[in-house]
Amino acid sequence: MLDQPREYNSIDVKPIAGALGAEIFGADLSKPLNDETFGEIYRAWLDHLVIFFRDQEITPAQYIEFANKFGEIHTHPLMKGLDDYPEVLEILKNEDDTYTFGNSWHTDQIFTDKPAKASMLYAKETPPYGGDTLFANMYLAYDALSDGMEAMIGGLRALNKGDNYKRRKQTGDHRSRAERYAAAKTTMKLKEKPDENRVTEAVHPVVRTHPETGRKSLYISVHTETLEGFNEDEADIIIDQLREHAMKPEFVCRFNWRPGSIALWDNRCTQHYAMGDYQGFRRRMHRLMIKGDTPV
């Protein structure tokens, strides 16, 4: 967050929490955006890490067009997109589903060589209550570390896996992702033919430097499995401590969805968590991701 509010000419930007997050007013994403308006939206996004738009009515083509202003589309290597728009992943939970997609603290696609720069979620149907998304500021999480912890983790690199074996081992569930999805009560679908060149595990620095702001942030996720150069028990202690630290309430904002809401977040400096507290109700969202670079 900025120490002093930035001035905007074509949009209104209203923070929703002290840690991160702001609502954007005055932008109709169904219409072409001029360079000044988009430039202000982009600056607000970098400043606030996650931005929100309300009451948007856009087609999948318009949704993709807006996303392309931030970069090329990053498709999910495992999950199936819409038939007519495969870039768009429909995150659907029906009334009798028991599985909640994204129901753990994570940053999108950390298990790929070039994780997604940004993700965008568009609410199509929402429950009467529940189903909020939490976001955490990983700049603040890093800044709040002690000097000793900063020094210890500054050069560490972590192995991240899309199908995290250690997480399954801890819960006693040794099935693969495909096996779990086949057995789970979920409407979400895996690709029938996963991408041939898909990558579902990657090693990245635990502390990454944002390529646009130059700020350092803590870069971990539920997908973080172990640390290079440490035995398993040692790595578990450090990772668990960093995870607990990263989700402190003072680093977090919470967003309440309604149909037509859009959230756009920066995966390079945030984590997020999808609440699953709306059992018995339907929730349907459309997600897009933007290609990123190799974390350093």
Image (spheres, grey):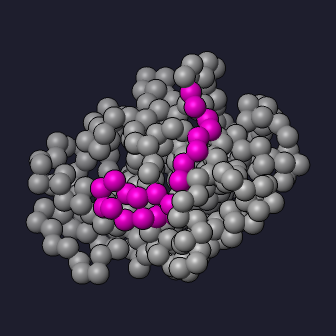
Q: Quadrant of residue 46?
A: bottom left
The residue under the point 41% across, 79% down is: 18
- Position of residue 259 measured from the top left corner of the image (x, y, whole percent): 43, 53
Tell me if residue 104 comes above or below residue 21 in the rendering.
above
Question: In this picture, is 168 found above or below 133?
Answer: above
Q: Say whether residue 194 is left or right of residue 7.
A: right
- Taking the image as shown, residue 117 lies to the left or right of residue 187, namely left
Q: Residue at x 54, y 38 (%)?
A: 112
- Numbered disc total: 0
Residue 66 visible, this angle: no
Q: 197 or 145, which lies in front?
A: 145
Of the pair 40 and 240, the residue shown nearer to us: 240
Q: In front: 204, or 139? A: 204
Q: Quadrant of residue 67?
A: top left
Across and down, in percent, residue 262 comes to 39, 53
Residue at the image point whose x is 88% and y is 49% from the top: 172
Image quadrant containing the N terminus: bottom left
Give how far across and how far down residue 253 sits, in percent: 48, 71
Q: Residue at x 56, y 27 (%)?
A: 198
Q: Position of residue 242 (x, y in %)?
A: 63, 68
Residue 233 shows up from this direction: yes
Magenta extent: 198-218
User: Residue 210 magenta-drawn?
Assistant: yes
Please say whether residue 75 is one of the residues in the magenta stretch: no
Q: Residue pushed farthest right? A: 172
